[in-house]
Image: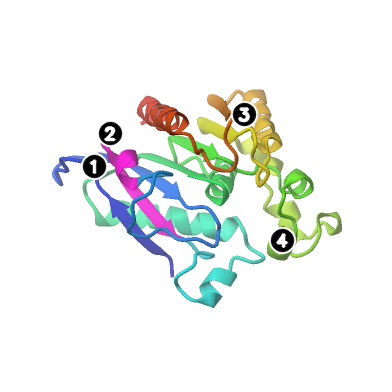
Amino acid sequence: MTKTTRKSPPNFDENKKYPLFVVIHGGPHAMWRDQFFLRWNYHLLASPGYVVLLTNYTGSTGFGEKFAQDIQGDPLLGPSEEINEAADEAIKRFKFIDGTRQAAGGASYGGHLANWLQATTTRYKCLISHAGLINLESQWGTSDGIYHREVNNGGPVWEQGEVWRKQNPIRYAANFKTPMLVTIGENDFRVPLNQSLENWSVLQRQKVPSKLIVFPDANHWILKGEDSRFFYSEVHAWLKKWL
C-alpha cells in the first residue's frame, strides 16, 4: 500500500483551485517525512500556490523490509503507477486540486521516475528531472554504484534481462512529449552528467520544449546557497510557464 501526504500553499483557501505538483523522493530506499530541509523543501515548492503531493512508493523505507525490497525487479514501472494512482486519489479526495493542471518532478531516483513518466504518460503538463537517469545501460557503466543496479534489474546489463530492455526510459524516446526541465551537477558521480546530456539530446531531437541547466560546482546534491536559490527560481519559473 502506497503512503502519501500533501502540503498546501500559504493563505490556503479550500474554496479555490490549485495546481498539483507531484514530488518524487530519491533513493529509492528513502522516504518523505514531516521534516524541514533545503533540498526539495515542501514549503518553498508550495509557496507560489501549489498543492505538493508526496508519495512513499514501493521501495521506500519506514514501512517494513518487504515494502522496501519489493522494488527489486520492478524499479520504474510499479512505483510510477503508484505515483499516478496517488495523484488520482488526491484529485478525487480534495476538491481544491485542479486535476487539469498537474506537474511532477524529483531528483536522483525521483529523477529516474520523472524520466519514466516522460516515457509512459502525458497526464502531466510539465516535468522536472534533477540527476535522473535516462538510460539504464549507459548509467551502469559510468556510475559510482553498479552492484545494486544489477540487483534491482535482475543481473548484469550484458545478460539483457527483461528490466534492462523493458524499463529503460530511452527505449521509449518516441513517446517523449511533455515539457521538461533537466538539471544536473557537473561533478555528479552517482548519476553522471552523460545521463542528462542523453536526456537533453533526446528531448531536443524530438522537439520537446525543454531546458538544461548544469551546475558546475555541484555533485549529486546542490550544495551552494546561491545555486539552490537559482534552482528554486528556475523550478518555479518552469511550473508557472506550464501550469
Closest to the camera, between mark 2 and mark 3, is 2
Q: Is residue 147 above or below residue 142?
A: below
Q: Mark 4 falls on what kind of element?
A: helix
The residue that disc 2 covers is 48
Q: Mark 2 falls on what kind of element?
A: loop
Q: Mark 1 falls on what kind of element?
A: loop
Label 3, label 1: how many angstroms apart (C-alpha)? 31 Å
Residue drawn at the location 85% of the way across and 59% of the way down: 159
The residue that disc 3 covers is 203
Asked if residue 129 can be seen in this view, the reply is yes
Q: Which label's residue is closer to the chain start, 2 or 1?
A: 1
Q: Which label's residue is closer to the chain start, 1 or 4?
A: 1
Instruction: Point out the image quarter for the C terminus.
Output: top left
Q: Which residues are magenta?
A: 42-56
Q: Which label's residue is closer to the chain start, 4 or 2?
A: 2
Looking at the image, which is closer to me, 170 or 228?
228
Tag on residue 153? 4
Label 2, label 1: how many angstroms apart (C-alpha)? 7 Å
The residue that disc 1 covers is 9
Name the spot of residue 201 as percent of width and height, x first.
68, 27
Would you say residue 62 sits in the magenta stretch?
no
